[in-house]
Amino acid sequence: MITPFQIAYKNLLRKKARTLLTLVGIMLSTWVLVSLFGFNRGYEAALNRDIDNMGYQLMVMAKGCPYEAATLMLQGGKGLRYMEPSVVGDIAREPEVAQVTPILMQAFFDPNKGESGGIAGFYGVDPASYPAMKPFLRFRKGGWFHDSAAAEVVMGYEAAELEQREVGDMTMVPEKNVPLKVVGILERTGSQDDGTIFVPLKTLQRISQTDQITTIGIKVKKDADQEKLETRLYQLKDVQVVSFSQVKQTIMKLISTARVMVFSIAIIALLIAMAGVVNTVLMSVLERKQEFGILKTMGAMPLDIFRLVWSETLILCSLGGVAGIGFALLFARASDILVRRILPYAPSGGLVVIDLQLGLLTLAIIMSVGLLSGLYPAWKAGSIRPLEAIRGE
Amino acid sequence: MRQFVVQIVCFILVMCAAAAQPVLAAVGCDLNDADRDVPRLFPDSTGYKTVYLSIANRGGAPLLRKIENRLGVTYLSLYAPIDVPYTLYEVYRDKRKIGYIHGVNQKGQFGGIQVFMSQDLAGRIKTFYLQKITGSSASKFREAKFARRFEGVTLRDFDSFDPVRGKGTGRISEIVNPSPELETDFYGILRGLKKNLVLMEEFVFAPERGKP
């Protein structure tokens, strides 16, 4: 026996081009919607991962714009102001502090980079405290420095790749022309560490002819009151405190503005797609008025006709929805690259993360909105008066 | 017919998705600012087209072995697996192709050397450009008078000179190292140039002559 679904399916096949265009509309809006949901989830996760990979929750640096400084830090930046190393001891004495590590970021002009020269960045870290803050760093070859003032470097994977360095090779600090030996190359982390060249803090201070530092990384004790600590750190002279939870909130606020706009566009796309569904099914109902009239004279109840027409909407929405989710999964990486090009700051790792749960949620939304759109045409079909319909023809 | 169309559409979708994957394998060698660098290397050019090539998609392992044999080394470069993308700039004057620009990464004494060369359609070097080199006197290698020594050099000139051992005769052997303290870099540049010429021969000129 033929089921209402089979009848609905055959009806949709009667006007192939119209059905196909409606399906494309639903598919595109589903694609946009699921990609946006994926971005919503992926961006925050990637940002959290980047911040966790910093190894510390608070950063103290010489006075300036804290957000600019934090963004520079996240992107492995340069050009920060200096502060006295004695601040490290002051901070270490705070009861909430688990670990501190002093950092010196330095940039040197390399005249032999590009057509008119470029900047080479070096990251001075304390061998006694920095590796302990980043225990997740793994070495592809070699290890950390042999002593705290060694003329050595540890390279992130991409830095080593660009410089074509292996453990045992020499590298040079441009501008100062100081040779340093490569003692370790890190595994790829997918974070800013990949492009970083680490130097022992004392060595970089000696090369830069300074005894100062640019940054202090602070790891807060578990269950400690971070806000209380931040308030006390603000009392220190000529320094500013950057909390990564604050940075995250600021970045998320910036992103949320863009997200609201894109979500609005997605909702408009969804409404257009649903208007297409209403149009397709309503046209089909009007074209088949006589057919429904005959069905009714043969004993079909309004609910039977309603179910028949509603099934068409259900088929359109489910096929379009599944296709849209399929395309979103297939092109997730392309979406990722596109988003990365558009955003001013994109954390490392996947930005558009789509999984089964997200796919099913989007499908449920599309089907619900679609079935609501199908109510009017289905009611219209169900309420056709048989004699009027036959006479009208 | 319908099945064929469906197969083609599926294939295109899979290829698009695969092409969109970020390249994590290794860094290639691109001009930092092609819009500025191409007219500088080819003053009479009006445009260029960027083409990405790899040994993997041009001939795979047999081609890799052939290139390594021609270069005389068992590995092309550090961090350069078979699928590393090489960037080829096809240079045009109006609609007419007038030459090529191609670059490679080469290990140097204190860092990576990025060696680019511009070639005419016959495979002769017009000029070469070191986009990146590290060392106290490395700037000597970037001087115009050093680059001029390579004008007109072809792959054939390397037949009588081995840049791996630094020995041989002919035109290349007569080129003087402008920075004797950076000997590794000098031979690195020569190896980079030969690598460029061999890759261009295998990627472009040999297929054009119909000899894959």
Image (cartoon, grey):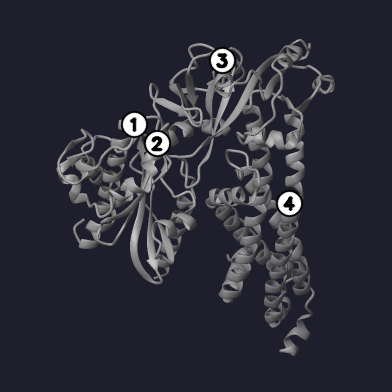
Q: Residue at x 41, y 62 (%)?
A: B43
> B20 or A8: nearer the eye?
B20
Instruction: Sort mark 1 into few (<14), some (14-19) or many (20+) by Cα contacts within 10 Å.
Output: many
Residue B36 shows in this picture: yes
In the rendered image, residue B39, in percent from the top left (x then y), is placed at 44, 60
In contact (CB < 8 Å): disc 3 and disc 1: no
Q: Secondary structure at mark 3?
A: loop
> A34 or B148: nearer the eye?
B148
Dot 4 corresponds to which residue?
A: A258
| Mark pair 2, 4: CA separation | 47 Å
Q: Chain of mark 2?
A: B
In contact (CB < 8 Å): disc 2 and disc 1: yes
Dot 2 corresponds to which residue?
A: B138
3 or 2: mark nearer the eye: 2
| Residue type, mark 2 in image | Ala
What is the number of the mark on residue A149? none
Q: Chain of mark 3?
A: A
| Mark pair 3, 2: CA separation | 32 Å
4 or 3: mark nearer the eye: 3
| Mark pair 4, 3: CA separation | 41 Å
